[in-house]
């Protein structure tokens, strides 16, 4: 597999989230190709504790993983796992809660839950963990930085909505409502998102130049964790499995199954930029 830019922006935040913290662990695997088949190997539970450790995202150089951890103080902070040293450091130590860390050059974008419960996108210093500036408006649940000043935002409206937000002009454009929490950039002009009902998800490709969405695929469970691979296309987690959508057959095919590693329910997954490693979240 070739390099990916997987956006692992997705979070459950607010008082409802804190009242129902799932038990989660973050696992790191090497990806090895044998006889033309890529398989996960060398499993390592990089958190391995009781509690909530979630929302992993590889650094741009692939040498570390940002993630969110909530510990005994019930405060969400960003931690960094340094792969080569097998070492974890705490990056943010604030009175606010930080979620969904994504690298932005040497810095990090994050959703910050402020003391008044507002939820905004912040730019955080990648070395000090201190906030540098606010990049988005309120009620941000999940987000994707499409371009320098443009974010795709899952807003906590009623019902939830997916909007394009320009950080300079402040313009908002509603794309859809009742969307799933994950959405992915395909290229410089397209992204993919899903709308779910009680039994399935309908996926659409959206062209930002044409301002038009076209149906792309459906999945027979209301799963919300997806990615887009430049060669394999749309990927989705399903229990212990990661499935890929085959455009030719219009069928979902098995990519990986982690059941033999004791993984039961994948709720996040992402690849490093060179496809040498995969990180997953297992709900216990």
Image: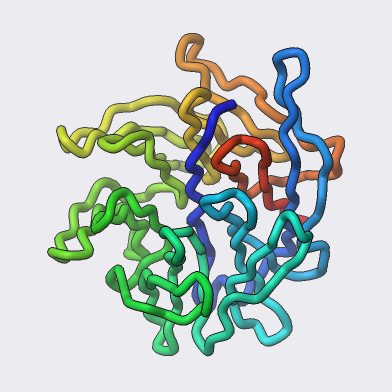
Q: Quadrant of residue 31?
A: top right
Looking at the rendered image, the quarter that the C terminus falls into is bottom right
Residue 198 in the image: state x and y as whole percent. 50, 42
Residue 142, position as x, y percentages in the image: 43, 59
Count of numbered tags: 0
Question: Vertically, is 31 above or below 173?
Answer: above
Going 65% across and 82% down the picture, which residue do you hit?
74
Q: Is residue 56 visible?
A: yes
Q: Is residue 44 left or right of residue 72?
A: right
State the residue in front, 128 or 191. 128
The answer to whether residue 274 is above or below residue 224 is above
Q: Which colour style is shown? A: rainbow
In front of the other: 70 or 67: 67
Horizontal relation, residue 155 to residue 227: left or right: left
Residue at 75% from the left image edge and 70% from the top image edge? 51
Please give left or right for residue 163 compared with residue 241 in the image.
Answer: left
- Quarter of the image with the N terminus is top right
Residue shown at 18% from the left, 53% from the top: 173
* Residue 195 in view in this figure: no
Q: Position of residue 182 (x, y in %)?
A: 46, 48
Question: 89 above or below 187?
Answer: below
Residues 28 and 258: in front is 28
Return the x and y of residue 157 as percentages of the image width and height. Answer: 32, 64
Quarter holding residue 64: bottom right
Q: Which residue is pictured at 45% across the width and 78% down the height? A: 113
């Amino acid at each position: 597999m070739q390099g990916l830019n997987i956006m692992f922006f997705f979070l459950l935040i607010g008082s409802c989230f804190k009242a129902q913290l799932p038990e989660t662990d973050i696992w790191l695997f090497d990806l090895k190709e044998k006889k033309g088949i890529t398989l996960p190997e060398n499993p390592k539970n990089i958190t391995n504790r009781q509690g909530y450790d979630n929302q992993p995202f590889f650094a741009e150089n692939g040498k570390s993983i940002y993630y969110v951890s909530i510990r005994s103080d019930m405060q969400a902070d960003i931690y960094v796992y340094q792969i080569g040293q097998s070492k974890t450091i705490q990056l943010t130590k604030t009175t606010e809660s930080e979620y969904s860390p994504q690298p932005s050059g040497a810095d990090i974008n994050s959703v910050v839950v402020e003391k008044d419960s507002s939820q905004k996108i912040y730019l955080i210093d990648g070395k000090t963990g201190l906030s540098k500036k606010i990049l988005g408006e309120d009620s941000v649940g999940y987000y994707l930085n499409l371009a320098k000043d443009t974010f795709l935002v899952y807003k906590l409206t009623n019902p939830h909505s997916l909007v394009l937000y320009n950080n300079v002009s402040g313009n908002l454009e509603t794309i859809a409502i009742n969307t799933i929490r994950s959405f992915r950039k395909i290229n410089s002009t397209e992204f993919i998102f899903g709308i779910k009902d009680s039994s399935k998800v309908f996926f659409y490709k959206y062209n930002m130049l044409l301002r038009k969405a076209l149906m792309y695929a459906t999945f027979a469970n209301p799963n919300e964790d997806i990615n887009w691979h430049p060669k394999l296309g749309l990927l989705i987690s399903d229990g212990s499995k990661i499935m890929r959508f085959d455009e030719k057959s219009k069928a979902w095919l098995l990519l990986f199954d982690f059941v033999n590693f004791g993984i039961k329910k994948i709720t996040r997954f992402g690849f490093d930029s060179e496809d040498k490693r995969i990180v997953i979240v297992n709900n216990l």
